[in-house]
Amino acid sequence: EAGVVQSPRYKIIEKKQPVAFWCNPISGHNTLYWYRQNLGQGPELLIRYENEEAVDDSQLPKDRFSAERLKGVDSTLKIQPAELGDSAVYLCASSLEGQGSGETQYFGPGTRLLVL
Amino acid sequence: GENVEQHPSTLSVQEGDSAVIKCTYSDSASNYFPWYKQELGKGPQLIIDIRSNVGEKKDQRIAVTLNKTAKHFSLHITETQPEDSAVYFCAAILEGGYQKVTFGIGTKLQVIP
């Protein structure tokens, strides 16, 4: 079974440029998460999708960050414009969940973003 | 919201010795506690988890204990091997409805051959 796929693996951009990350979750997983991981820190949740619905985006900086999961499968996270402080690893995770139960989150390899 | 504290931040042990990493959480409603191992350049991988209706769980050389009253849980690795060297993260999750997930800061474990 294929794991969570993310692309690109690395991205270097200049500040004020836009950037997008793509995630394809494990087949059949209805829940998808985007996390940001700063150097030496644990992952911090940015947004969580149940199918195509964003059910928790309270930590997403909405002035510059946006995300979509139009068909409830793969997802894109965008930053526009990027700032120096956005340099981090962006992790995608997926899980198979139902209301009232929780399941293991499986993480992708992440996209390492460097903003110059 | 939930706050998870993890310590130590770094841990060096000799190969064959045991390693213990501890986490405390603040929200007594949290009921699911996974541990993840993250190797350099990779995403976190689940190694063991425990739910609040269980006090201890073991899987070969790794075990996790949970004290709900004190709101802390620990990861125990016995007979450590060089390949155990990685960063380990604990997390506290509120299951039911929509999950709330909070990760610890991570512990960098170095196993010295």
Image (cartoon, coloured by chain):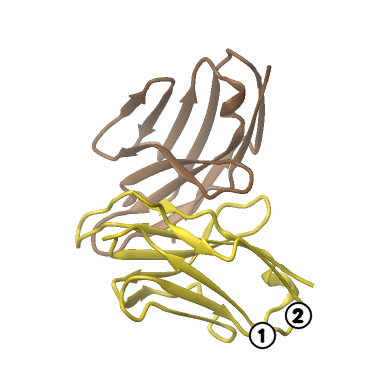
Chain colours: A yellow, B brown
**Residue A101 higher or lower than B21, as above or below:** below
Q: What element carries label 2?
A: loop
Task: Find the residue positioned furthest to the front.
Answer: A1
Q: Which residue is drawn at 68% across and 79% down?
A: A82
Q: Is residue B95 left or right of residue A85?
A: left
- Image location of residue A18, percent across then percent down: 65, 83
Q: In this view, does B86 lie to the left or right of B47?
A: right
Q: Is residue A94 visible?
A: yes
Location of residue B5 by image quarter: top right
Identified by mark 2, the residue type is Lys
Q: Which residue is drawn at 46% across and 31% down?
A: B74
Identified by mark 1, the residue type is Pro
Q: Residue at x 62, y 48 (%)?
A: B41
**Residue B6 higher or lower than A82, as above or below:** above
Could you classify mark 1 by the number of other residues whose Cα lies within 10 Å: few (under 14), some (14-19), or many (20 or more)? some
Could you tell me which chain the residue with mark 1 belongs to?
A: A
- Image location of residue A39, percent across then percent down: 68, 54
- Image location of residue B52, percent across then percent down: 28, 40
Q: Residue B89 carries which label?
A: none
In front: B27, or A78?
A: A78
Q: Residue at x 60, y 36 (%)?
A: B86
Q: Name the residue under label 1.
A: A81
Quarter of the picture holding the C terminus of chain A: bottom right
Q: Is residue B27 visible?
A: no
Q: In this view, does B25 lie to the left or right of A112?
A: left
Could you classify mark 2 by the number of other residues whose Cα lies within 10 Å: few (under 14), some (14-19), or many (20 or more)? some
Q: Is mark 1 on a helix, strand or loop?
A: loop
- Give yes or no for contact between labels 1 and 2 (Cβ–Cβ under 8 Å): yes
Q: Name the residue under label 2.
A: A15
